[in-house]
Image (cartoon, rainbow, N blue to C red):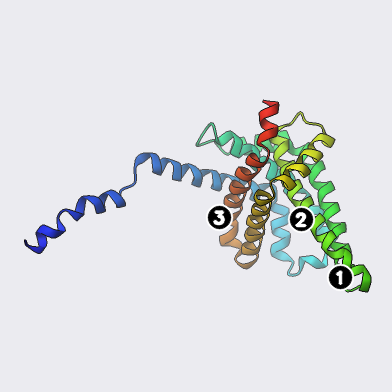
Amino acid sequence: MSAAGVRQPLRPSLAARVNVGADTWSVIWSLVHRVLVVNLGLAITNLPLLVALAVVAQPWRYPVFFGLLTVGVGPAVAAAFGYLRQAEDDDRAPVREYFRAYRRNFAAATRRWSVATALVAVLVTDIVWLHDAGPAAVLVPLLVVTAVVVLAATVLLLALVELAPGLGVRAAVRTAIWSAVRRTPLSLLSLVVLLAALLSVNQAPLLALSTLPGCALLVVWVNSRAALAHVTTSTS
């Protein structure tokens, strides 16, 4: 048997592995479209913060100034969740859907994000002050765990703005904390993804900002929907 005769049967299987079906390409481009829209929306709604970060070399030296600028992050994330929810029904949802979600969720998301940001700032300040304070340092692990729970619950609170807009503030807070603790693996995964995106943006701002925020929020949105499935099922 010739060598050519041995190679010929392998060609169809190789082509089958290389070729990608139309449905697969549609899914890929749909995901790319969602990521690009979310990145664009985040960049526009947080433009003052991005400009300040580009100008100031050591932003941690100006906590009040940058703390005020980060207030816009909450409604921008809630708008991203709203857009991603809309994109589940429309694979190529236009950019205007992001800004509609931004207007719709702005007030509730801003209130929840502002309170959570202030609470995390207090916890971080306490951790910094107490970590070398002798006997008081035993409180640091408790404060760290509390800060992690607050961050995880805040992400779910922003998702609830879109998933359960009629839910009261107290009920939303209880639901977010309970879901964050009950679905700890999902909560930790969301925080790790967000932290990785932030660190990448710090290392390569232009490249990371153009790709990672949308990818990270897409993962966080899927995790949040799974963690809050019991809420959306009961309210639907």
Q: Quadrant of residue 141?
A: bottom right
Q: Where 18 sits versus 100, above or below?
A: below
Residue count near mark 2 (Cα–Cα under 10 Å), binned few <14, some 14–19, many ≥20? some
Look at the image and tell me in which quarter the N terminus lies: bottom left
State left or right for residue 212 relative to residue 66: left
Q: Amino acid at mark 2?
A: Val
Residue count near mark 3 (Cα–Cα under 10 Å), binned few <14, some 14–19, many ≥20? some
Question: Whole-percent x and y of residue 7?
Answer: 15, 59
Q: Quadrant of residue 49?
A: bottom right
Q: Where 74 sits versus 232, above or below?
A: below
Residue count near mark 1 (Cα–Cα under 10 Å), binned few <14, some 14–19, many ≥20? some
Question: Whole-percent x and y of residue 46?
Answer: 70, 50
Residue sitting farthest toward the top: 236
Disc 2 or 3, which lies upstream in sequence? 2
Q: Amino acid at mark 1?
A: His
The residue that disc 1 covers is 131
- Residue, x 61% and y 53% (percent of image)? 213
Disc 3 or 1, which lies upstream in sequence? 1
Task: Tell me the number on the disc at residue 211.
Answer: 3
Q: Quadrant of residue 212?
A: bottom right
Task: Tell me the number on the disc at residue 148.
Answer: 2
Q: Secondary structure at mark 3?
A: helix
